[in-house]
Image (cartoon, helix red, strand yellow):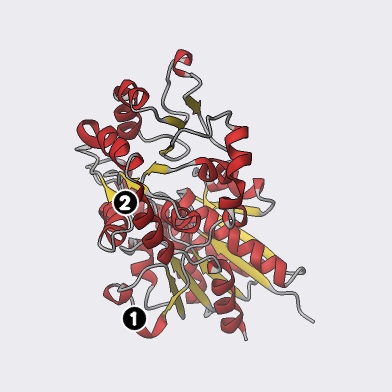
Amino acid sequence: MKKLKVIISGGGTGGHIYPAVAVAQELQKRIPEVEILFVGASDRMEMEKVPKAGYKIVGLWISGLQRSLSAKNILFPVKVIHSVWKSLQILKTFKPDVAIGFGGYASGAMLYAATMKKIPALIHEANSYAGITNKILKDRVETICVAYDKMERFFPSDKIVKTGNPVRKDLMNVQSLRNEAITFFNLDPNKKTVLVIGGSLGARTINESILAGLQKIEDAGLQMIWQTGKNFSISENLQTPNFKLQTFIYEMNLAYAAADVVVSRAGALSIAELAQVKKPVILVPSPNVAEDHQTKNAMALVDREAAILVTDIDARNVLVDEVIKLANNEIKQAQLKNNIASFAMPDAAEKIVDEVMRLIG
């Protein structure tokens, strides 16, 4: 019997990479003999993260258009042509049975080439507002997996399958880990805990807002786990019994388990995780993303009373006050927990793989 070969392409951000890896793992679980090749952008984080997860990756010379006037934009058409050509070479050598795209410019080039060669293709759109790559590919692929309702605005309705965004398996039952988490982070079990996360690089506005309000947080009797990100330097003397600062939190299941209230950006993967762990959240969408899609992600929750929104521009003035207010309002916390739970789709990776298997018969 012929071995199944799958190309998975996507990257640029964790929101594209981690769901792609989750799908690769589910494919391996179902078909241990499957051969998987990742294709990404040669200078982006997938070139480090994918091999760490145990998969082979090939890089394309591709990057996005700069929104400001930039000399880099002159090279963009050359990079696109080069990347499609290299993708065709990869297809010729690897001979995949199916191609899966998770967004990002590398995914655009690879899926464009795959559909030129009539290879069955599927894309996954993580956000509530479709990215430019997936909008370009919508008429070329057979199946479009989405995480939000009302995606007919962007894609042919007969191709849409709502699967959700894949999240890590260790987030499935964090409620049972609370005592372990309190011990792990050396927290006071009688105090409310705030978890602040801004992504692996950090979120400048969130960090600066929290930094400015530390005394208020202390005075309110709260304790905090704070992932600052590697781009934000904070002095060591802020590390106190009430404030646990880490550049990066590897034990996110325990961080969520300890948290009574979460402050987060509004990336698709973050929201999928927050829905899975059922935590009351204050979302501060990043304004530095294509088509302001994080605000649109956040509004999908806010409209169903599943999250609180603080805009990036208002955060320095109101974020800490909103954190304290929510931490002291258990009725509001319960409402947010209950409503965000309806966004959880714990079997998203399985559903996407179901669609892949349907495509290849």
Image location (x, y in percent) of residue 357:
61, 80
Left of 331 or right of it: where is 56? right
Q: Nearer the viewer, residue 180 or 135?
A: 180
Q: What element carries label 2?
A: helix
Report which residue position mark 2 lands on: 332
Image location (x, y in percent) of residue 315:
24, 36
Q: Is residue 238 above or below residue 144?
A: above
Image location (x, y in percent) of residue 313:
20, 38
Q: Is residue 291 above or below residue 159?
A: above
Callout 1 amino acid: Pro
Q: Residues within 10 Å of mark 1 (few under 14, many from 20)?
A: few
Q: Which of 359 and 263 is in front in this view?
A: 263
Q: Is mark 1 on a helix, strand or loop?
A: loop
Labels 1 and 2: the sequence-earlier one: 1
| Labels in figure, total | 2
Left of 199 or right of it: where is 87? right
Left of 262 or right of it: where is 32? right
Residue 109 tag number: none
Is residue 16 visible from the viewing direction of this image? Answer: yes
Q: Is residue 105 above or below residue 326?
A: below
Query: Quadrant where the N terminus lies?
Result: bottom right
Quarter-wise, where is residue 33 in the image?
Answer: bottom right
Image location (x, y in percent) of residue 342:
41, 66
Callout 2 amino acid: Lys
Residue 156 tag number: 1
Q: Residue at x 50, y 54 (%)?
A: 277
